[in-house]
Amino acid sequence: MALAGLGALTAAAPVPGFDTEQRPDSAPTQSVGAVAGPDGLEATVTSTSQVGGTVPFQRTVHMRVPAMCWMTAGPSGAEYAANWGEGGTFFEANGGSGGYAYIRSVYPDFEQYADKDGSWYTTRCRTDAPPTLVVEYLRAHPPRFVETGTPAPQPEPDVDPRVLVQAARDAVVLPTGQIRWNPSVTGSGATVVNLPTFVWVEGSTTAVQVRAEIPTTGTWAQIDATLGGLDLAAEGADPTTCADNGTPYTPGMTSSSCAIQFTRSTAGRPVKAGQTLPTTTLTATARWAATWTSSLGTDPQPLDVPATTTTAEVPVAEIQTIVTR
């Protein structure tokens, strides 16, 4: 699944090359220096998670954010002229005069540098760089000859905000919490067949905001994710969809925003490792709705955030009743 508007960057997995150094701090970094070439520069990534109206945790980490494109030293003036001049190896291999016209348009008067000491600096881009970003960078950074002793082209002390979106996404932490349920028989924790089992996830987050920023330039990207609901599933019960992460049980409750009903007890099933009673696995899958914004000034764009899953082993008991008339 692709990040909307980010071309080749993908949301399904981290972009290769992100050197993540997670160093929790109490305050963001105050200085960031440009690093030459694809090594990129350091971004401050701050995550804030909420459970209901509270803020249970906030953390700041630093991530090495790669440059998508940069300028690097290439062939010397003599090497380039020998290869691309009339009769040269590349000149002949690329169709003679046709290739020569193209090269001359990109490297004007390259022959005049044949006898000079120095190198041609050209643009290189990561293979996963968005095509539109590559085109923009190539137009702004045409090849240039740099004579020996002349300062080489310096990397820009910034990165495209769209790259920071991926950095922010890589830093997203979504606590899964712990499944609770009621009825929960004292001593065994068992629920009961054919009664609605109220379910809630304790300690799970309901909203997350992650902001990745290059402090010295003010370039930033931000992800805002909110819980879209829970999907409950367990053997011995029909799947259930909940609009939220459930309501903690309080005495006297007669209904809940999240409930599942078991139709079979777990009696007679094998006892799983770590359990003392036969159980069924209850799985709660949290769905997320997320958008990203950045210093590009665009409207919020949709972003795919993987669902988070937590499980619990639930004993299911059967209550025997005697009906009299």
Image (cartoon, helix red, strand yellow):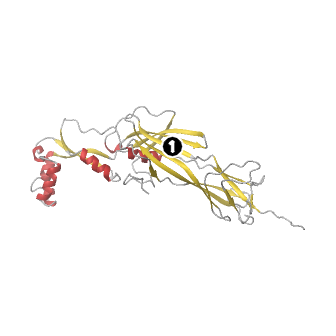
Q: Residue at x 15, y 40 (%)?
A: 117
Quadrant location of the C terminus in the rendered image? bottom right
Mark count: 1
Hey, which residue is sitting farthest bottom in the picture? 325
| Residue to which mark 1 is pinned | 209
* Residue 112 lies in quadrant: top left
| x then y, percent, for residue 113 | 12, 44
Does 30 sit above or below residue 15?
above
- Horizontal relation, residue 131 to residue 262: left or right: left
Q: Amino acid at mark 1?
A: Gln
| x then y, percent, for residue 238 | 65, 64
Q: Residue at x 37, y 45 (%)?
A: 66
* Residue 241 lies in quadrant: bottom right
Hey, which residue is sitting farthest right in the picture? 325
Quadrant location of the N terminus in the rendered image? bottom left
- Horizontal relation, residue 114 to residue 186: left or right: left
Element under disc 1: strand
Q: Residue at x 70, y 55 (%)?
A: 198
Q: Residue at x 31, y 51 (%)?
A: 132
Hey, which residue is sitting farthest top in the picture? 30
- Horizontal relation, residue 268 to residue 84: left or right: right
Instruction: Work out whether residue 316 or residue 160 is closer to the camera in this orientation and state it.
Output: 160
Disc 1 crowd rating (10 Å Cα; few below 14, some 14-19, many 20+) is: many
Does 8 sit above or below residue 39?
below
Instruction: Work out whether residue 98 or residue 321 is closer to the camera in this orientation and state it.
Output: 321
| x then y, percent, for residue 213 | 42, 39
- Horizontal relation, residue 299 to residue 145: left or right: right
Instruction: Work out whether residue 316 or residue 5 is closer to the camera in this orientation and state it.
Output: 5
Instruction: Work out whether residue 261 or residue 172 is closer to the camera in this orientation and state it.
Output: 261
| x then y, percent, for residue 75 | 19, 47
